[in-house]
Image (tube, helix red, strand yellow):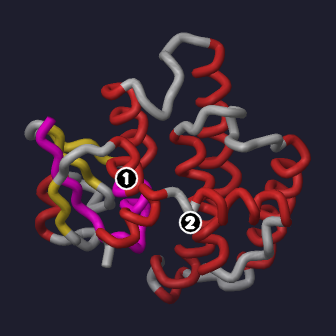
Amino acid sequence: MDLHLYGGPKSRAFRVIWMLEELGLDYQHSLAAPRSDEVMALNGSGKIPVLVVDGTAISDSTAILTFLADRTGQLTFPAGSLDRARQDGWTQLINDEFDSVLWTASRHSFALPEEYRLPEVKDSLKWEFSQSAARLSDTFEGPFLMGEAMTIADILLTHCLGWAVVAKFPDAGPKLTAYRDRMRKRPAYIRALGSAM
């Protein structure tokens, strides 16, 4: 596969960098900003990341991770299996209850035009995050969300838990913090950080 990733590492593009490193795939990387000319030419929404695969652009970090996992048969369970349904359930939960809350807080911090920002909404978002983290901690057994097998859901959750620290959200609790710190020691994560410098 010919792979070219667009998007800076201080964004959801980091998830894709980490995935590519976990898979050991060769890729090109352009530190393109959202709504830059090169991104707009590939994705009409102007959002990053965008991964161009053999000349075809794929947008949305979760869609990209899913494609790469399905194409390589790694960090996923087979489509149509019960394990895959459970994995997809984790993926959707993380997007719904962690990513969306963090992104809404970001929008009201810097992404929206200033006149549309409502900073006071962030208190309720932090409460939602804490509730979701507590529920997840109650059911999380580890070492990964799917037990012994790491999947793309772990990349998403680890990224969100790190994002929460940067966004000054409440601590996710000892169990999820230990999980996050353990995941960030993975060699592929460390390589992804290095490639992002």
Quarter of the image where one finds residue 70:
top left
Query: From this viewpoint, which residue is outermost toward the right?
Result: 138
Among numbered discs 2 and 1, the one appearing first in the sequence = 1
Quarter of the image where one finds residue 148:
top right
Residue 196 location, x and y as percent? 32, 72
- Residue 173, compared with residue 100, is above or below; it is below
Q: Nearer the viewer, mark 2 or mark 1?
A: 1
| Alpha-carbon span between mark 2 and mark 1 | 17 Å
Q: Is residue 190 left or right of residue 169?
A: left
Q: Are marks 2 and 1 in contact (CB under 8 Å)?
A: no
Q: Quadrant of the C terminus?
A: bottom left
Residue at figure coordinates x 49%, y 16% from the top left: 79
Disc 2 designates what residue? Answer: 103
Label 2: how many residues lie within 10 Å, few (<14), some (14-19) or many (20+)? some
Residue 96 location, x and y as percent? 65, 48
- Residue 8, compared with residue 166, is above or below; it is above
Query: Viewer-proximal residue, 184 or 169?
Result: 184
Residue 98 location, x and y as percent? 67, 57
Does the magenta segment cover residue 181? no
Element on which disc 1 rests: helix
The kind of residue on which mark 1 rests is: Val
Q: Quadrant of the N terminus?
A: top left
Query: Viewer-proximal residue, 197 or 97?
Result: 197
Does the magenta segment cover residue 13? yes
Element on which disc 2 rests: helix
Which mark is on residue 16? 1
Magenta highlight range: 1-17
Residue at figure coordinates x 29%, y 69% from the top left: 195
